[in-house]
Image: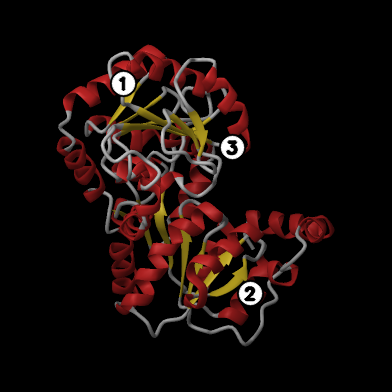
Amino acid sequence: MSGYGFLSEILFRLAKPFLNKKYDEGNDQRFGRYSDELPKDALWVHAVSVGEVQSAYPFVKRYKTLFPERQVLLSTITKTGKAMSGQLMGDMINQIYYPWDAPSILDRALTTLQPRAYVTIETEIWPEMLYQLEKRNIPAFLVNGRLSQSSFLKYERFHRFWSSVINRYSLLMVRSQADRERFEALGAHPDKIKVTGDCKVDALIERKENAELSALKALLPASAPVILAGSTHEGEEMIVFKAYAALLNKYRSLRLVVVPRHPERAQVLLREAEKYGLGKTVLMSRPETEWNVMIVDKIGVLFSLYGCVNAAFLGGSIAPKGGQNIMEPAIWGIPFCQGPDYRDFTEATDGLVKAGVCQIVHDDKEMCRFFDGVLKDGDIEKYHSGSRTFFESLGGASRKSCELIESILDGR
């Protein structure tokens, strides 16, 4: 037993009462007790929670399309992750909760499940699991791998340990060249790393293709230009309102749609908008024929709204929230701006700024200049082209990952 394994065995035994209290379902599975009725020789895919499940979805879907006879086990740690995996993948998968990372627990789990191979989505790395898989000659793969600079610095403090851990993977399939360089710097063998792109892009492309826009377009003017402020946080709407007020002096027919990150703030924003003399302000839930500003008080419509407007501002970025999902406006090929705090989406933002699709703004004046430039320009095709180029470099990750995994498994 490794030093880590010895410590984890003690830790999880001592923590068992606490863990059983914290998690109100799946505790037998979390301690390695699985039904013999679960399929053997399956591809085990681990996606810790909702975000990782969303990345896993296009990979699992592609895998089942390419290899329909293969079984898939999908493990999560959180209840929300399990619910999301059931919603997205349904009967494509067999759902389980992930076992804790201790030798006796994993021995029980692997003896029962006997997977063909094991796949980690993104960077959910459990050292003892990789050790136990290696002992049983079960290949392990990292799919949609990412390693931020901050995570790299944390791992780097224990370089020798993490280098030995990540080299137990048969293959590391990472999202970008920057991720590749960080994994190499952490000690991963270069031959074990492939840049395959981002699986979430595949899901996003599919989501765009299946989006239904007609109902939303019916709420918007057919001929007047529309700008959108999406996922805004407190304080950002005031900046948007000031920018819009200045734009109205030049573009009298311009309309503004505001989608607050928390829709329960809609009534407050309705009153705030009226202070700026912006014209008639309405709620999406109570639409009217004539309006200047529409406040969205519904959930689940922002993604499709991006496909209905001329340009956008992406919130959570002037307010210090780290940014929001920059890929959602970008996939529609519309020009958009965001604030300087995009620490959660650094590489994507840098790529989209370089592609000419995104611009960084700091205040209402810069925002006004951005929208003015877009409305004056009128050449929307260059933004579509920049978006296509950006996403073509990231798409296809699911197919590439599936094919790489099967080529290694078939060659064993």
Residue at figure coordinates x 82%, y 55% from the top left: 18
> Which residue does the numbered mark 2 point to in the structure image?
109
Identity of the residue furthest to the front in this view: 289
Choose mark 3 or mark 1, whichever is in front: 1
Choose mark 3 or mark 2, whichever is in front: 3
Q: Is residue 4 above or below residue 183?
A: below
Q: Position of residue 214 (x, y in %)?
A: 35, 53
Task: Assess disc 1: are there few (<14), some (14-19) or many (≥20) residues with their C-alpha within 10 Å of its C-alpha.
Answer: few
Residue 125 visible at all: no
Count of numbered labels shown in the rendering = 3
The quarter of the picture where the C terminus appears is: bottom left
Q: Position of residue 263 (x, y in %)?
A: 58, 38
The amino acid on which the numbered mark 2 sits, given as a three-letter code, is Ala
The amino acid on which the numbered mark 1 sits, given as a three-letter code, is Arg
The amino acid on which the numbered mark 3 sits, given as a three-letter code, is His
Residue at figure coordinates x 43%, y 43% from the top left: 147
> Which residue does the numbered mark 3 point to in the structure image?
262
260 relative position to 170: left or right: right
Mark 3 and mark 2 in contact? Answer it, CB < 8 Å. no
Q: Is residue 380 above or below residue 78?
A: above
Residue 311 visible at all: yes
Indicate which disc, 3 or 2, sits on the residue closer to the N terminus: 2
For the residues labelled 2 and 1, the Cα–Cα distance comes to: 66 Å
Residue at figure coordinates x 46%, y 37% from the top left: 324
Indicate which disc, 3 or 1, sits on the residue closer to the N terminus: 1
| Quarter where residue 2 is shown | bottom right
**Disc marking residue 252:** 1
The quarter of the picture where the N terminus appears is: bottom right
359 relative position to 323: left or right: left
For the residues labelled 3 and 2, the Cα–Cα distance comes to: 41 Å
345 relative position to 379: left or right: right
| Quarter where residue 48 is shown | bottom right
